[in-house]
Amino acid sequence: MSKSLLLLYLFVGSQMLAKAQLFTGAQNFLQPSGLLNAIDQNQQQLNPAASCPKAQKGFYFYASVPLQISNLNGAFFSCFYSQNRWAIYHEFSGVFHPAGQYFQTAHALAFAPYPGLHIGLGLQVQLFTQPNYYGNLLVASARLGCQYELKKRQHLALVLQDIGRVAQQQISIEHLLELDERLSFAQGLSWNPQFKPNLYLTLTQKLSQAKIQFTCGLFPQSYAFSVALTQHKHFTWMIGQRWQSAHGLCFQIGLNLH
């Protein structure tokens, strides 16, 4: 019974506050994990301003499969490219189930007025289709973000999410500290004023040809673990798993071409 209600919340996108909160959590649950700060790779899927000077262009593909919800799958494709002080990002993603589908296209533009500061604006359009129950629903929203280098090896990010959607708009803040060239620690929160803030801690360890990342979150309780393996300097494979108290366990696999 609980799984059926979750699917209903996931695809309908109701304007009721409780349903909006559950839908947002499920949507983020299926997306690739990452940070609001970009220190070694582009992170504009979470922060429109988080472009990395070390990454000039690239393509990402991810697939997600929750284990406790049968016949539910998620797919995510994005690309980015930068020139001078500008970085452009495009994303296409979807959640698929026999009862209904969800599609999203998102686009972002980042600008660096001077070294250490990035400002970005993102727009996204979402389509929910559930013809057997409610038909189609098309919604649009915006994101505004910035990333600032406080001092060497310390970064601060601020994002306003889902601007224009009262039930889901939230503010996200993250502080990242590079302990050394291989180890970094991030702490942050995402908060919709109508609900409890979502707090999280992330630890990232870089190896010679791999990167390990672990995130632990509260409200709701969750964790994400991923391993990225780089081959031939231009191919990076990612495997990982996520768990959230409301949705259970999810496995992810991804490919990055850069």
Image (cartoon, rainbow, N blue to C red):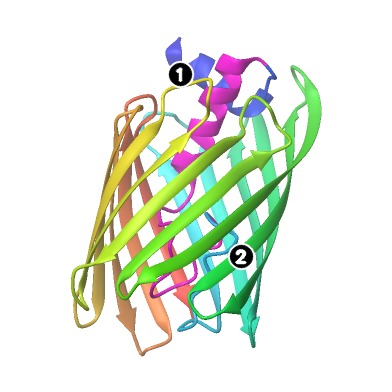
Q: Residue at left 39%, top 72%?
A: 39
The residues colored magenta run 16-45
Tell me: residue 255, above or below residue 226. Answer: below
Number of dots carrying numbers: 2
**Residue placed furthest toward the top:** 1
Tell which of 69 and 103 is nearer to you. Answer: 103
Element at label 2: strand
Tell me: residue 163, above or below residue 135. Answer: below
Residue 20 rendering spot, x and y as whole percentages: 60, 23
Amino acid type at mark 2: Ile
Examine the structure image and report whether residue 175 is included in the region drawn in magenta. Answer: no
Residue 123 rendering spot, x and y as whole percentages: 73, 52
Residue 165 rendering spot, x and y as whole percentages: 70, 32
Residue 140 rendering spot, x and y as whole percentages: 77, 41
> Left or right of 144: which side holds 128?
right
Locate the N terminus and report the quarter of the image it occupies: top left
Element at label 1: helix
- The image's mark for residue 211 is none
Residue, disc 2: 119
- Within-10-Å neighbours for mark 2: few <14, some 14–19, many 20+: many
Amino acid type at mark 1: Lys
Tell which of 197 and 106 is nearer to you. Answer: 197
Quarter of the image where one finds residue 91:
bottom right
Tell which of 207 and 184 is nearer to you. Answer: 184
Q: CA distance from mark 2 to mark 1?
A: 40 Å
Which of label 2 and label 1 is nearer to you? 2
Q: Upstream in the sequence, badge 2 or badge 1? A: 1
| Visible residue check, residue 236 | yes
Residue, disc 1: 3
Quarter of the image where one finds residue 179:
bottom left
